[in-house]
Amino acid sequence: METSLIRNVAFISHGGAGKTSLIEAILYNAGGTERIGSVEAGTSVMDFDPVEIERKFSTNAKVASVTWNKTLLNIVDTPGYANFLHETKCALAAVDGAVVIASAITGVKAETKRVWSFADEYDLSKLIFINKMDKEYADFYNALGDIEKAFGINPLPIFLPIGSEESFRGIIDLVRMKALIYPSEPTAMYTIEEIPGELLPEAEKYRNKLLEAVSETDDALIEKYLETGELTEEEVRKGLREGVVTKRFVPVICGSAIKNIGSKLLLEAIIDYLPSPMQRGAAYAVDKKSGEPVDVTASDKEFSAFVFKTFIDPFAGKLSLFRVYSGSVKNDSEVLNVNKDEKEKISQLFMLQGKNFVKTDELTAGQIGMVTKLKHTETFDTLSSYFDPVEFPPVELPDPVIAFSIVPKSKDDEEKVSSGLHRLIEEDKGITVKRDEQTGELLLSGMGQMHIEVVVDKLQKKFNVQVELKTPKVPYMETIRSTANGQGKYKKQSGGKGQYGDVWLELSPLPRGEGFEFEDKIVGGVVPRNFIPAVEKGIREASADGVLAGYPMVDFKATLYDGSYHSVDSSEMAFKIAASMAYKKIAMDAKPVILEPIMTIDVYCPEQFVGSVIGDLNSRRGRINNVEPQTNGQHIGALVPMAEILKYAPDLRSMTGGHGMFTMEFSHYEELPTPLAEKLIAEKKQNEA
């Protein structure tokens, strides 16, 4: 396949706008499928994961390849719900253009603006498709205004609707200035007629806007337009292509994916106007040998490819999806994983059509394909030739925003949960798993509660592992505020050899974050040297449980300054126990307090929600550090106790209508207010009773 005849395009939007349904219609129109799949009926070739079929929305990015009019079209279907937009960003790293779907009913939502910003980050050319023109309350012009306001652009309609809601029956083609009338059944076939008289003034108005925009892409076109006021169909198409490739404007198409109205026109527009990999320009990479940045183009001879997605199939194993940026790769060849510096065997290459894999002998520059069972390769790795290896940068993803403790339901699940989670992490770069050293909990972190629930569903359906989700424990700690000293004496006689250990300790506070320090001030051998390590060990082990509520004691110094021993009965164990006894007694006299973790949180939201967000953070015992203007909104920086924001993500989404985003990280520990500490201690005692 010639690189100039390839189009790689991602379909992006908010959830429920109809991306997958639109792709199903396009695949059918291009002859890639024998019928239009349905998300609702679970027959979609794109949403094939059991979790997606059950929930009726996309959670993974998927690829469908189809050839139409001698052009290879690689369509990437992406998730639209907020919890899965990291998948969308990964997919955009592999394409040259984007189709942004807006709803004729709801217009542009917060998620649409986020994926639009991702497309801008990758400097992608775009088309806009206003979908659901056949639905109740559909309004093309309202949606158009919403697009203009939300994205800060002047959208350029190249088609206008004929009717709306139940009366939606066709489209005005502003390039040909003809009416395209569709039958009631979804065939994508239409008859070409003259534009209805009552719609002609509106059509001429938008036709003039179209001519003005395309004429400005070329000096010869603008000269002709100024002289004659008209351009030929061929000249308009040429100007449209130039304007889209150079990102001067964004054409707007309209239709209904369910009724298959306008979807074939979108297919034609993708091929006619979006750039090929050759036109897209160079991709940024780093020369592995020199460490210098290099531009990789589709005309370069040496093979290079970027792995942008991994699927884990319980039967087929690891499936690696990649975009070839230069050169070519064949079956039974050997390539270099640049990130791991390991050889990889390419046994069998595939092209994709959703859940269907099509074998191919070779993939060339610009193509998107898949290979199975690579040993070392993970998502964001670069595959390259040995002779001129380059490395593409990984996709920068936001940090997880919510964590849950996961508890296996049975002993069998306990043994399988680690393996299952490890494989899902390979598939989904938006999740992390770690063991909390203090609480001992296994914490699963993700982009939202729905994301975590989907991961748990996949654990069960893919790997037959069942777990329960619980809110994670807050890792409280304890410390002391004053200096105290005292004795710990352990003496036991039980016939024969006894046990004897006697120590005098001083406990004193250390600055926050210093941990634990032990000092030996014994003189004169009152405690033999060989028993002193046992004293330190006894304090360390005992301080793992604080004296107030059993949380670890931190930021204190223990000084051993006196003691006594018995020549026969003293032992390391006796001194360890004596030290533990001394610690517990003295710590209660040193004004112990509970510490809570404080998080740094950065919230980004539109101007109109700033007051609500700040008020909410204050109610969570937060301290606002700064409020700064940002593009399309405000940035609010604050310090908030972890206990108050364990489930902040859904609250912020509700508060801002889905427009708010945040990141957070651990900052430091602070003393827990006395009333809350007393409540925590009481709860702890009640649970232990």
Image (cartoon, grey):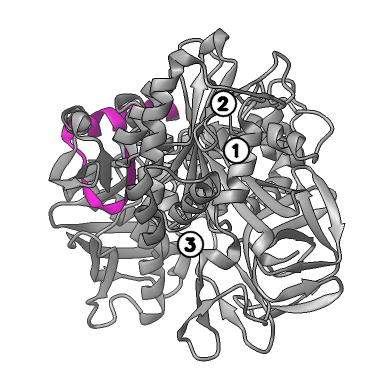
Left or right: 580 in relation to 667: right
Residue at position x 59%, y 75% from top? 339
- Residue 104 magenta: no
Quadrant holding the C terminus: top left
Mark 3 or mark 2, which is nearer the start of the sequence?
Answer: 2
Which secondary structure, mark 3? loop
Residue 498's disc number: 3
Left or right: 602 in relation to 571: left
Q: CA distance from mark 3 to mark 1?
A: 90 Å
- The quadrant holding residue 132 is top right
Question: On the image, numbered disc 1 is attached to which residue?
Answer: 266
Residue at position x 74%, y 24% from top? 187
Identify whether 662 is placed above or below 375.
above
Camera sees residue 628? yes
Identify whether 561 is placed above or below 123.
below
CB under 8 Å between discs 1 and 2: yes
- Where does the image place residue 196, in percent across and percent down from the top left? 51, 16
Residue at position x 59%, y 34% from top? 19
Which secondary structure, mark 1? helix
Residue nearest the viewer, comparing 449 with 40: 40
Residue at position x 73%, y 59% from top? 369
Q: Which residues are magenta?
A: 660-687
Amino acid type shown at disc 3: Gly
Question: On the image, numbered disc 2 is attached to which residue?
Answer: 255
Mark 1 or mark 3, which is nearer the start of the sequence?
Answer: 1
Quadrant holding the N terminus: bottom right
Which secondary structure, mark 2? loop
Residue 228's disc number: none
- Where does the image place residue 205, in percent across and percent down from the top left? 36, 29
